[in-house]
Image (cartoon, rainbow, N blue to C red):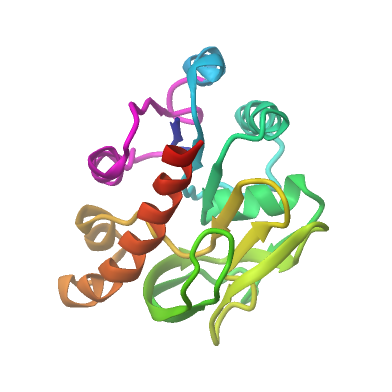
Amino acid sequence: MVIDPSLKTPEIESYNNLVLKSPVKTSYHLPAIHSTKSMVESMNNILGIILLGSAASVNDDVDWIKDIELVLQKAIKNKLPILGICFGHQFIGKIFGGEIDFLWGSKKKIGIRKVKINSSSLLKDSWEDYLIYSHNEGVVSCPKNFSIFGSSTMVEIEAMSHNYLPIWSFQSHIESSKDFAERIGVNQKKFEKTIPLSNKLINSFFKKISDC
C-alpha cells in the first residue's frame, strides 16, 4: 500500500517508479485529495505500507491524518513492514512519541544533500551519497525504541529504524522522480546524483517485503 498525502499534486510518477520496483501488487491512496475510504478498506489485503511526503504538517489536526494513524497502528500491530518518507518519516516519529518541529524557523529548504547511512536492519552496508530534500520540519527528538541510522550536516535525524519492528523512515525523498525534482526546482543533473542511494534504499525495503 502506497499512501500519498499530497494536498494538491499527486505524485503519480513517483508511485509508478515504486510499482516498477515492487515485488508485490501495490495500491495507491490519496487520503487528503480524495478520500481515506479506499485506504481503510484495503488494510486486510496488504503486505506493507509506504507513507510518502506532504506539504501538510503531521501536527495538523485534520481527520485524514487521524485516519492514516489508524491504518498505521493496525499495520504496526500486525508487524507489517512500514516505510516513511519526509512527512511519513515525521509521522512515524510523532506516533511513537518523538518530537516534530521546524528546523530553520518556518523556512522551507529544497535541494540535494549528502547523507550518511549507517549499517542497520534495512541495509547491512554503510553508504554516503546525495539525496533530494524539500521540507521545513523534521524529527528533533528520536522516539523510544528507535535508532538513528542516517544523518547529514543539515539534519541530525535523517533516518530512523525501529529496534525490533520492521519500520524505517527517511527525511529525504528516496522515492523522488524526475517530475518531482523539476516541480520543486532541482535540475536534472543534481537529481541524477540522488538516484543510486535512493534506489538502494527503496530496493532494500522491498526486499524486506519479499522476505515476509
Quadrant position of residue 30: top left
The foreground one among 7 and 37 is 37
Residue 79, position in %: x, y?
Answer: 66, 35
Q: Main secondary structure of the magenta part?
A: loop
| Residue extending furthest toward the front | 211
Q: Is residue 98 left or right of residue 12?
A: right
Q: Is residue 20 left or right of residue 50?
A: left
Q: Position of residue 175 (x, y in %)?
A: 36, 54
Report the residue at 45% width, 50% height from top: 205
Residue at 32%, 37% (x, y): give it: 23
- Quarter of the image containing the N terminus? top left
Q: For residue 32: magenta? A: yes
Q: Which residues are magenta?
A: 6-35
Magenta residue check for 161: no
Residue 9 percent location from the top left of the image: 33, 41
- In this view, the residue in front, 62 or 191, is 191
**In the rendered image of this protein, does residue 97 appear above or below residue 130?**
above
Q: Which residue is pictured at 64% across the width and 78% down the height? A: 156
Name the residue: 68% across, 43% down: 60
Q: Is residue 104 above or below residue 121?
A: below
Residue 39 to residue 181: above or below:
above
How far from the left and from the top, in percent, is residue 128?
Answer: 42, 82
Q: Is residue 33 above or below residue 205?
A: above
Q: Report whether residue 6 is seen.
A: no
Front residue (pair 120, 17): 120
Q: Is residue 122 left or right of residue 132?
A: right
